[in-house]
Image (cartoon, rainbow, N blue to C red):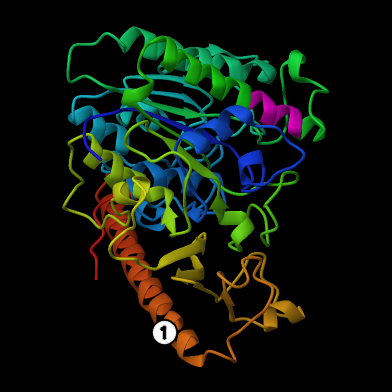
Amino acid sequence: MSGRPNIVLVVMDDLGYGDLSCMGNTILNTPRIDSIAAGGITLRHMYAASAVCTPSRAALLTGRYPQRVGLPKVLNPRDGTGLSEWEHTLPELLRDAGYRTAMFGKWHLGCRPEHYPTRHGFDEYAGLLYSNDMHPVELFEGEHISTADVDQATLTRAYTDHAIDFMERHSNEEAGRPFFVYLAHTMPHIPLHVEAEFRGRSAGGRYGDVVESLDHHVGRLLDALDDLGLADDTLVMVTSDNGPWFEGSTGGLRGTKLHTYEGGIRVPFVARWPGRIPAGAVSDQPACLFDLLPTLAGLAGGSVPQDRPIDGVDVSALLAGGSVPEPRPLFFFHWWTLNAVRSGRWKLHLDRFPRDPNRAQDRELPQLFDLELDPAETYDLKDRHPDVLEHLTDLARRFEDEIAGQREAAEARAAGRATAGHPADGGRPLSSR
């Protein structure tokens, strides 16, 4: 892949792996997102780095496991922590490469001024600083509250309007100034809200109405790119931050949001860049949302930081219909506890949330699944493949030790700064073993 594309990244909140008709859903209709898959590629083994939103989004924007970033759990408005200024984010890397950058939608990486999106690489921002089930629900524009009494039914349209306006304003920029739009929709996270024109439209109830509304507004983005003559010059991606919660489809995968079984961490992912991504392509090679940082930085002509571990890898060859030359294991945590590791076709579960050692299914851990044979993680094969069990257990323990060592070092530095009268910063450099 060559050239410097405009980049539009659409991330839904809690959209399930099986919620799109292009992923096999026969109840919900998502023709506009399906058109991205038809005109581009579907990555059927794309993972979020976490089964909940804050750590998933931290990983996406930093290219690093959220445990390295110091954001392993969901933040609430009362938390004083957030994304550290020491982190180099995707929009910062793109802005350094000459891009105009904007974010519209849910942030959820801290709500103090030092954590705002505009302090982490975005030229423009409008949206909610945290989830729509947390209070107060306030709409920000830039660094100021624009609406303190938000009608959540208007958010999907409003975010899309902002994105289209941004693209229109920068469509005639001087050569070499492409744009990056991060559109992080609030829906279909509960509580569900949808515009009146979509209520009762879907056979999938209120949840289906919300998803079909999201699809409609993705279509508006695509139409705007066509009208501006930018469709061929723009990489469009649609995905989700984790699996579905109380409603939604995992496409038959086990578990939901909060769980590190496939249903909680495997997410839909479709991408289109005409002439650069082959139409109708499908890949079953594992990838993770934190791969987007090195991938997009590379496409933009930028570079990733060299002074810290970057866990993502450049998957531009994968998007182009090829493969990643060096497959690597992927590790999945709940907070600070390593739950699972995937390597190739194999997935090993060492722990789970919630954990109750008195329950029979928890006493069965560890569990080993062959995801090519058994994507629903139904049949434990650890007794049949003791060599695989040993290998993955060793990978997991070594990585767990690495993260634990980095956490201890970060806490010691934080304690030293606090003793010296300086604010603790959990995002300082963490050495890699």
**Quadrant for the N terminus in the image:** top left
How packed mark 1 is, by other alpha carbons closer than 10 Å (few <14, some 14-19, many 20 or more), is: few
Q: Secondary structure at mark 1?
A: helix
Q: Residue at x 67, y 65 (%)?
A: 354
Q: Is residue 395 left or right of residue 382?
A: left
**Amino acid type at mark 1:** His
Judged by its main secondary structure, the magenta piece is helix
Is residue 212 highlighted in magenta? yes
Nearest to the observer: residue 81 or residue 92? 92
Q: Is residue 333 visible?
A: yes
Residue 207: quadrant of the picture: top right
Residue at image mark 1 = 391
Nearest to the observer: residue 140 or residue 413? 140
Residue 182: quadrant of the picture: top left
First to last magenta residue range: 208-214
Q: Position of residue 342 (x, y in %)?
A: 47, 69
Q: Is residue 162 left or right of residue 93?
A: right
Q: Residue at x 47, y 31 (%)?
A: 111
Q: Is residue 66 above or below residue 366?
A: above
Q: Is residue 136 visible?
A: no
Is residue 209 highlighted in magenta? yes
Q: Position of residue 396 (x, y in %)?
A: 42, 76
Q: Position of residue 73 (x, y in %)?
A: 52, 51
